[in-house]
Amino acid sequence: MVGCGRKIGDFLCCTVVCGNCLEAMKALPDDCVELVFADPPFNAGKDYGSTVNDNKPRPEYLAWLSLFIREVPRLLRHGGTFWLMHETKWIGYCQVVSDSTGMSFRNMVVWAYSNPTPSRNRFQKTWRPILLYSNGEPAVFDSNAMPLSRSTLYFNKSLASSEFCHDLWVDVPKLVGGIFAQDELITGTDRRFAHLAQMPEKLAERAIATSTDRDATILDPFLGSGTTAIAAKKLGRHFLGFEINHDYCKIAEERIALVEAQPNLFDKKPEQIVIPTISSPTT
């Protein structure tokens, strides 16, 4: 990937770096990004390839989470924001560690998706938490930069003056596979996930639009299929992404290239930018 010509430490900006995020983050200079968006593995036993152990003993996993989170405030410029999406099982620990770093808690956003995750001997899961912290007072924060597309506070929608955004995000469906797969989903020939935990683009778009200006730099330490990078490109921001699985790096690079190839990219709204469907990773 060519990048945008800028450098962040030893890394070329607007590129996908294939490697361990803990090592790569330590190689970054202080105060180098305006936003960190992280969606780490949940230790749920998923197969992300031989480079990832998603079934660590609890103490080992929590120690790993702590190492990652504690590196974030050093990288954030003053006024920058940290968005951390995780599972309800682990979010309390993430919040305790984030509090201990000196960053300022802002919100716990609830991403309420409309398609529950089946469960046994417990209620089906219908939401996922996203922590929002800032390094000091946020330098940029436009809470209505990307309004909700569904009303949540009024039974009679005609009484609502606007669909302003709050901490309950109900307008972003979870990505699903099979015959119900959305166009956004990266799939193989069987219409199943090419990446086991692909994130909807709108989540990253809303976070980036809310808390950064154009030309800001966004870091995603767990880039996966490249969703955060795509959102950054659509919104006229720079990005740096770390991903340990080389197949996922290829998927991300292909998706980013498709976005960059579109004419008049920054004259469009994010929802007007269409990424052609691509298949599972090329090898």
Image (tube, rainbow, N blue to C red):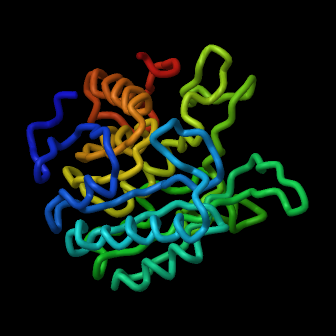
In this picture, is 102 found above or below 249? below
Which residue is at a point 63% across and 51% down the rendered structure image?
Answer: 171
| Number of marks in the rendered image | 0
Percent coordinates x, y for residue 276 in the rendering? 46, 19
Point out the image quarter for the N terminus. Answer: top left
In this picture, is 89 found above or below 237? below
Q: Quadrant of residue 183?
A: top right
Percent coordinates x, y for residue 269 in the rendering? 38, 39
Q: Which residue is situated farthest in the right direction here?
A: 121
Question: Viewer-proximal residue, 3 or 282?
Answer: 282
Question: Viewer-proximal residue, 277 or 172?
Answer: 277
Percent coordinates x, y for residue 216 in the rendering? 22, 54
Q: Is residue 246 left or right of residue 95?
A: left
In this picture, is 186 found above or below 225? above
Q: Is residue 271 left or right of residue 104?
A: right
Question: Viewer-proximal residue, 66 or 162?
Answer: 66
Q: Quadrant of residue 166?
A: bottom right
Point out the image quarter for the C terminus. Answer: top left
Percent coordinates x, y for residue 241 in the rendering? 31, 45
In this picture, is 24 found above or below 264? below
Q: Is residue 119 left or right of residue 25?
A: right
Which residue is at a point 47% across and 63% down the rendered structure image?
Answer: 84
Which residue is at a point 25% across and 62% down the rendered structure image?
Answer: 34
Q: Is residue 36 left or right of residue 238?
A: right
